[in-house]
Image (tube, grey):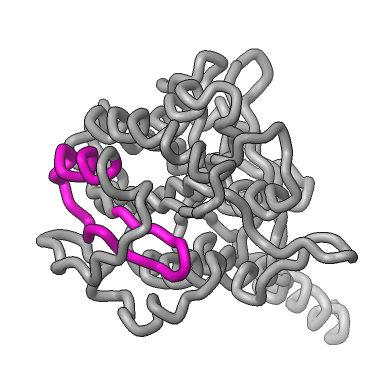
Amino acid sequence: MHPGCLLAALLLASAPSLQEQVEVSRVLLDARVVGRGGDPVLGLKPESFVVRVDGIPARVEAADWVGSGSAQAPATTGPHLVVLFFQRHVESSRTEGLLRIAPMVARMVETLDPEAWIAVATFDSHLELYTDFTRDHAAVAEMVRRRVMFVDHPGMPAEGEGPSLVSRLDFRAMKKAYNVETALKLLATALEPMPGAKSLAYFCTGMGRLTSLGILSHRDFAPAIASLVRGRTAVFSLDLVQADLHSLEEPLRVLARATGGFYDKTYVLPIGDVHRLESALEGHYVLAIESPVPRGGEHRVSVELARGLHGTVHARDSFVD
């Protein structure tokens, strides 16, 4: 064989080692699945989900249920953390919604997983934390029934025995949180480093400011969402305004959709909305997916149930690789 041909053959034989290697990206997504009657959908498998990243189908490697009835939680799971966040107003059209729903939320708290840690926060003129994470659900239910609908300023609570928001929140910054977006950002930042998926039930009346050009978002709105997404904190926005629609509801929808929660109006059937929230808090699936797109940057993601299965999937709509 000619020496040049021999050299070419050797180069071809070694070609696999020179080929570009594509690193497969694996992403964790938290998916809450609620059926037509508002109950959680259980027993789903990896093949039960259809996931697309930037419009391209992605393989679901695992679908682990985390919540009530789970025999063994995956290693990605931390303690079950729930924050009840109440936005309060002095306007009667907005106060009425909170007064109406508070007893239903209190009953929901009493039925939650006994292992769940619950914290209670409010916003009126600034951020207040009523209790750090606690498993004393009876005390939380009583607090929701008796206190959160009235504007008072209890001061910083004692640090709890388990996971703690008190240790991660700056009391002076809370007092200076003059708008709800800043208050939400403080909560998001405190929750972000805590392990596992978290839930924030936001009993709300609106976000942003109505201008002649439309709704103007506060500068802390986008950073709050980014922190919530990084921290795997799903926001469930339950709108308390007693009206079919209002001008400041769109940011509430954006917030829920981006973080993997949902938006509901409580004007018509609040008991049904609270039941759907209770189902979402009961548990979720941790989906391990193999991303079909190159690593790097932000990617859009959609999660649905496979054909023939019924239910609504709530999962965040993007991730950063």
Depicted 112 relative to depicted 194: above or below:
above
* Front in this rendered view, residue 268 or 321: 268
Depicted 268 relative to depicted 238: above or below:
above
Q: Position of residue 254 (x, y in %)?
A: 68, 52
Observer able to see residue 239: no
User: What residue span does the magenta drawing correspond to?
Assistant: 120-144
* Residue lying farthest to the left in this orientation: 161
| Left or right, 2 with reference to 195 | right
Q: Is residue 142 magenta?
A: yes
Residue found 60% across the figure and 17% down from its top = 310
Residue found 31% across the figure and 30% down from its top = 108
| Left or right, 98 with reference to 224 | left
Observer able to see residue 253: yes
Q: Position of residue 149 (x, y in %)?
A: 37, 47
Q: Position of residue 17 (x, y in %)?
A: 65, 73
Q: Is residue 219 magenta?
A: no
* Front in this rendered view, residue 257 or 17: 257
Q: Which quadrant holds the C terminus?
A: bottom right
Q: Which quadrant holds the N terminus?
A: bottom right
* Front in this rendered view, residue 99 or 161: 99
